Image (tube, rainbow, N blue to C red):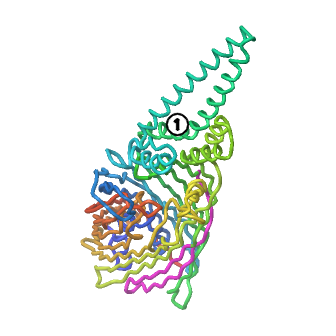
Amino acid sequence: MRPTFHLKTLTLAVAAFSAASIASAAGLDRSGQDVTAFFQDGTYAEAVYTYIDADVTGNDNAYVGTSDTAYVKGNKTGDIAEDYDFFRYGVKTDINDTFSVGILYDEPFGASAEYTGNSNFTGSPVTAINDLIGERLTPLVPEVTNAQELSNVVDQSQQSLAQARAQVAAAQAALAANPALAPILGPQIAQGQAQIAAGETRLAPVLAFDNYAEAQLANTQNTKVEVRSQSLTGLLGVKLGANKNFQIYGGPVAQRIEAEVALRGSAYDLATGYTSNSNPDMDYGWIAGLSFSKPEIALKAALTYRSEIDHDITIAETYPLRGLLTETGALRNGATPEQAAALGAAAVNQTTNYEVTTPKSVNFDFQTGINPTTLATAKVRWVPWGDFAITPPLYNEVSKANPAYGPDGLNLVDYKDDQWQVELGLAKRLAPALAVSGTVGWDSGAGDPTTSLGPIDGYYSVGLGAKYNVTENWAVSAGGKYLWFGDAKGVLPTGKIVADFQDNDGFILGAKISYQAKQGF
């Protein structure tokens, strides 16, 4: 005989695609940090797989001018959202009618994006380099306004210096052969050497710019970002009240996070060529909550708080602009060209530690029976992404060289608004072993405009799922969701608009296998 769905267990029909229904577009949110597995009766275990395929396309900014907020539709960016998947696992058991324990694994935060094709986010950053030359070098060398003119001037100057060195060498050889010519050749040699020294001094900053420009223009890579995290949550629950309707629960959270970032093309202006690799770091926080249940009407409600987690991360950064700034600064302070070049090369790379604080969150989960075969559910999630920032030390340090961003400098990633997410669902038993469910959802996003590394402003969604009881204890579930993403403009940390993303969508698929055994106390 097939097992029968009871009203108080219909929530599992919704849980069939809970991973798909929670996966979020705001900030770096991904799993939604679901804890509903802990509220199942008896001994319960689940394994959930979620796959996200988002289509996020837009156009770069073709505007030429001084306004940071002006936008002119430019080249297509291609689909920047890479396919993304993650797993979630959970197991819990009731020790007795008062105490429960559980362990949950998920991958709460992440990002995976890459710009491809022909846009300002890929290839040689010609516009950025020419703008830098026009801003920093043209006032000193009026005949140089772009990279090609810079290369021509450097070639001509080096040829002139080579000729002058040859003339001095010839005079020195003649003097060595006939010391009697000293009254004539001595002053010529001294004058030539002085002219060569003066020429090398004038050429040194120009040559530094040329070396920087050549290195950047040779870079044809793509802008991309990859963020991954894993979280392990331990839970202890205590049921209270005469009927054990209330439960308080909490425990420790271990979280691991890592990231890679590469900024390429002209869109990132002077930051083009920046690369960082944040090594994996494990740190700890906590979770606490309160739940209420009334089994006779399948009512369950839970309010869960997760703390912030501070990560002290080792990060290796490469910032080509810093090498140029260091080299030209050393030349202004009297260093020789060789000394300045060595200082510039050493300044490009830096490995240090910095702090990233993953945000706190509040989840509210609710369900109640409508009739003997129908269950209504609701989920609400709040995450204060407006307080979140990623501030790599070298990136921040270089930004402070611009008085407009001092004294605090710039963050690499931050968000304007907090995230609110709401999802409503219905689950219906169609047969003794089969239930289906559907949801509608809304995500507020974390502000528009937003970072160009994740240019989505929330979404609306619809989803469907089903759960089938294979045996009395084992069940399989599957579900999916379609999402309409909110339009957003991508901006640099400086506030400059660099792209516009409209009319994008995506889908999420989830599959789960679960086991449940009731315990009688």
Amino acid type at circle 1 is Asn
For the residue pair 90 and 353, the one nearer the viewer reads as 353
- Residue furthest top as drawn: 177
**Residue positioned 50% across, 33% down in the render:** 154
Horizontal placement of 381 versus 376: left or right? right
Q: Return the x and y of residue 348 as percentages of the image width and height.
A: 59, 44
Q: Nearer the viewer, residue 84 or 300?
A: 84
Q: Could you tell whether 84 is left or right of 319 in the image?
A: left
> In this rendering, is residue 299 above or below 467?
below
Q: Residue 512's x, y, as percent?
A: 38, 60
Q: Residue at x 43, y 78 (%)?
A: 365
Residue at (63% x, 53% y) in the render: 314
Q: Residues within 10 Å of mark 1 (few under 14, many from 20)?
A: some
Give the overall secondary structure of the magenta segment.
strand
Can residue 89 be seen here? Answer: no
* Camera-side residue of 12 and 448: 448
Q: Write down the residue under mark 1.
A: 211
Q: Is residue 380 visible?
A: yes
- Residue 453 in percent (x, y) is at 42, 57
Residue at position x 35%, y 52% in the image: 80
Residue 36 in picture, x, y percent from top left: 45, 72
| Region rendered in magenta | 279-306
Q: Is residue 303 magenta?
A: yes
Look at the numbered disc 1 and give the secondary structure of its residue.
helix
How many labels sit on residues? 1
